[in-house]
Each structure stands twice: as C-alpha cells, then as structure tokens.
Image (cartoon, helix red, strand yellow):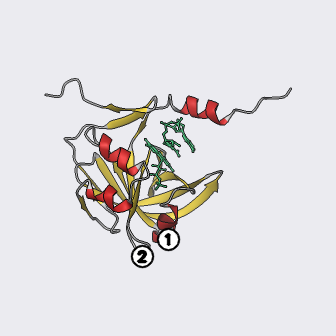
Amino acid sequence: MTIPPIEQQQFRNAMSRLGAAVNIITTDGPAGRAGFTASAVCSVTDTPPTLLVCLNRSASVWPVFQQNDVLCVNTLASDHETLSGLFGGKTPMEDRFLAAQWSVLTTGSPVLAGAVVSFDCKITHSVAVGTHEILFCEVLALAGDPLTHGLVWFDRRYHPLIRQDAS
Ligand SMILES: NC(=O)c1ccc[n+]([C@@H]2O[C@H](COP(=O)([O-])OP(=O)(O)OC[C@H]3O[C@@H](n4cnc5c(N)ncnc54)[C@H](O)[C@@H]3O)[C@@H](O)[C@H]2O)c1
Ligand SMILES: Cc1cc2c(cc1C)N(C[C@H](O)[C@H](O)[C@H](O)COP(=O)(O)O)c1[nH]c(=O)[nH]c(=O)c1N2
C-alpha cells in the first residue's frame, strides 16, 4: 500500500485549526537586539523548567538568536494584535521595538510591558528539523500581569480571550 504524502498546503490548512497563544520572542546580546512573532512555543519539562521555540532559519532574526544564546518569550495580551503584526512582518527591527515599552530581567532580553507572562531564558541547546530550529530554553526568571487577557491565533486570525465573568 502506498501512502500519499501530505502536501505543504494540506499541513498548513490542518495546523490553522490548531489554536495557539501568540508570543513575541526577543533577544539582546553581542549580536544585537531582535524579536519575532511565534505561535510555535511549547512547555517541555518543569525540571528543569524548560520550554521550546521553533524558529525558521530563513528568518532575518535567526543568526541573532543563534549568537546571543538567550531569549525572552513574551506571551501577548488581547490588545497586542498590532504589535504582533509588526514583529511578524518585514518591519525594520528598531521600528518593531519602538512600538512598545520594554524592561529586562536576568538575561538582558527585552521584557514586554503588559504581556500576559514573560519567560526569560537561556538557550541550552537546539535541534534542526527541516526548515526550522527547535530552541530548547531553560527559564531563569518570570514576569507577567495577572489582570491581562490572552490572545489566540486560530483560523489565520487573532481571537482576543475575554473572560465571560470579566467586569
Ligand atoms: N511555525 C511557523 O513557522 C509559523 C507559525 C504560524 C505562522 N507562520 C507564518 O506566519 C504567516 C501567516 O500564517 P497563517 O497562520 O496566517 O497561514 P499559513 O497558511 O501560512 O499557516 C497556517 C498554519 O500552518 C503552520 N505553519 C505555517 N507556516 C509554517 C512553517 N513554515 N513551518 C511550520 N508550520 C507552519 C502554523 O501553525 C500556521 O498557523 C505565514 O508566513 C506563516 O509561514 C509561521
Ligand atoms: C501569528 C504568527 C505566528 C508566527 C509567525 C508569524 C505570525 C504572524 N512566524 C513568522 C515570523 O514572525 C516572521 O517570519 C518573523 O517576523 C521573521 O521575519 P523577518 O525575516 O525578521 O522579517 C513564525 N515564525 C517562526 O519561525 N516560528 C513561529 O512559530 C512563527 N509563528
């Protein structure tokens, strides 16, 4: 029996049905400051606290993350749609960062003001799979705003998460 291969577009159409949090992944260090929008973020283990980020190696930011070896995962709030678009397009890097306020925690990676949660991490190792690099990241510090509402990428558009009981 021959199993027909899943085409790229079929895979993307299927993945578009898998809702995901939207994040801006930032870094700063010897290679400079950079950031991009990512939905491919996942918890790996809590001992040591580790998450993963999948980054396309064709992105302009890839060499910067590779050299800095640190990053911050900033999970976006319901009012961050415009910011997500800036970090997900071909916008010049300085213009992306001018559109929001930033601080730092432990690694020096930019921490977004008003994020739902921020994970400040060192990249412990990475694995290449196809077009992407899976970055395994140990979490060194946390921040966040418990009053914010989340944002989900589903069906190729944003869905602000507003709790039914929110006043
Ligand atoms: N993991 C990723 O690299 C990823 C995830 C989401 C969106 N994007 C990019 O954002 C843009 C808009 O995406 P969209 O969701 O509106 O429509 P789309 O049809 O390009 O993608 C649909 C879904 O497929 C997956 N996907 C898309 N490109 C991928 C890739 N190169 N590798 C692995 N998975 C991929 C994602 O889950 C995405 O939500 C596109 O340029 C897309 O490539 C990339
Ligand atoms: C909602 C959403 C979600 C994602 C993306 C886009 C958008 C709009 N992009 C694409 C990524 O943000 C884009 O390629 C970067 O801006 C890098 O582009 P430059 O090469 O720096 O212009 C993206 N890229 C990636 O490598 N991993 C990911 O998980 C995602 N997820």
Q: Is residue 2 left or right of residue 144?
A: right
Tell me the quadrant of the picture where the N terminus can be found.
top right
Question: Which residue has dot 1 on it?
Answer: 67
Tell me the quadrant of the picture where the C terminus can be found.
top left
Q: Residues within 10 Å of mark 1 (few under 14, many from 20)?
A: some
Question: Which residue has dot 2 on it?
Answer: 30
Give amino acid for label 1.
Gln
Q: From what the image shows, is residue 84 above or below residue 134?
A: above
Q: Disc 1 vs disc 2: Cβ atoms closer than 8 Å?
A: yes
**Quadrant assignment, res 141:** bottom left
- Farthest residue in the bottom direction? 30
| Residue at x 51% of width, y 31% of height | 16
Instruction: Determine which of the numbered discs, if any, sits on residue 24 in the image.
Output: none
Q: From what the image shows, is residue 121 above or below residue 18?
A: below
- Element type at mark 1: helix
Q: Is residue 61 left or right of residue 24?
A: right
Number of numbered discs visible in the structure rendering = 2
Image location of residue 2, percent across then percent down:
84, 28
Give amino acid for label 2.
Pro
